[in-house]
Image (tube, rainbow, N blue to C red):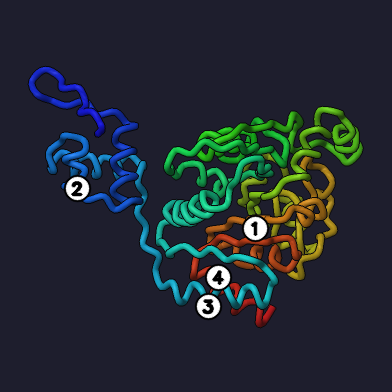
Amino acid sequence: MQAAPDAKPGGRTEVTLDQVTEIAALYYLEQVTQEDLSRRFSMSRPTISKLLKRAREEGIVDIRVRARPAAAAALEQEFQRRFGIARLLTAVDQRDQDAQRDSVAAIVAMHLDSILQDEMIIAVGMGRNIAAIASHIGMPVTRAITFVSAIGGSMRAGEHMSSDHICRRLAARFGGESETLYAPALVADAQMRRALMANDVVQHTLNRARRADIALIGIGDVNEDSNMVRMGWFSPAEIAASKLAGAIGDMMGYDFITIAGKPADVPMQGRVIGLSLDELRRIPNVIAIASESTKIVAILAALRTGTITTLATTEANARTILELDATA
């Protein structure tokens, strides 16, 4: 029997986070009743109830209701038929954009919890949608996984746009270690990119990313207010010129594509240190995450590249993509 927690002066009981986690796991995963938990841990039922509430408040337990599972299954089957993907993960639609991103990130975190195994390598892109995954606390699991930066770093990016920062947080969340790509994300021209890509240190990390079992990537839309413009990677004029050239979205933050899912002929191509679309296609499971409704056209273009294995978005986005695919 589990020993009772030490009593503090005045009769107050000190309960560790590990004990809260153990109690929550027994209750939610093994269906042990509160009455049985009360006896096992020598606590009153009201105390057990308070600890279960604490587990929810601190993110140890994350309860979700999946809306309309039959409808979600039907959507997934249609996406599989049209785009050849393996999985469609749809979140419940939210009015607030941050809540929307959090909702999609939550289903991706749950999905990763179910598929990650020891010795796996995960290639990691950048962006708010990917960064949000690590914020979802799950049951502590010891795993031997490597999260590898699939794109270089940027001083202007901020934490949510830094693949290295995201890798470290994902490793802390899911277990394992992280590996940094020691190179800038963006360089001045293609010649400098070729020189850096030939560097032994850069090659070592990119080769590991190329051998990944899973890739986590974002999808971006091309507009003058995009993250790439705010970070100073590309000017509004360059973005406008790329739109005139037919670019409507990007994958991994830099691979610009047309509505047909083909590479767009724009001058910004060939300046970023990271995995290419062709290299992503060789990774068994490419999980693309895009929660924003403004990215619907870009998501459709990304699906048409044949790169994506698993798409995570919202139900409303998924339905609109199907409608757009029938006309565009």
Spatial CA span between label 3 and label 2: 38 Å
- Sequence order check, earlier mark of 2 and 4: 2
Q: Residue furthest left?
A: 10
Give the amino acid type for the residue marked by disc 1 in the picture.
Answer: Asp
Closer to the camera: disc 2 or disc 4? Answer: 2
Spatial CA span between label 2 and label 4: 40 Å
Residue 74 is marked as 3
- Sequence order check, earlier mark of 3 and 2: 2
Kind of element beneath mark 1: strand
Mark 4 neighbour class, 10 Å CA radius: few under 14, some 14 to 19, many 20 or more: many
Residue displayed at 69% across by 31% down: 180
- Sequence order check, earlier mark of 3 and 4: 3
Q: Which residue is mark 4?
A: 318
Q: How many marks?
A: 4
Spatial CA span between label 4 and label 1: 16 Å
Instruction: Give the quadrant of the C terminus.
Output: bottom right
The x and y percentages for residue 238 are 76, 50
Q: Residue furthest front?
A: 1
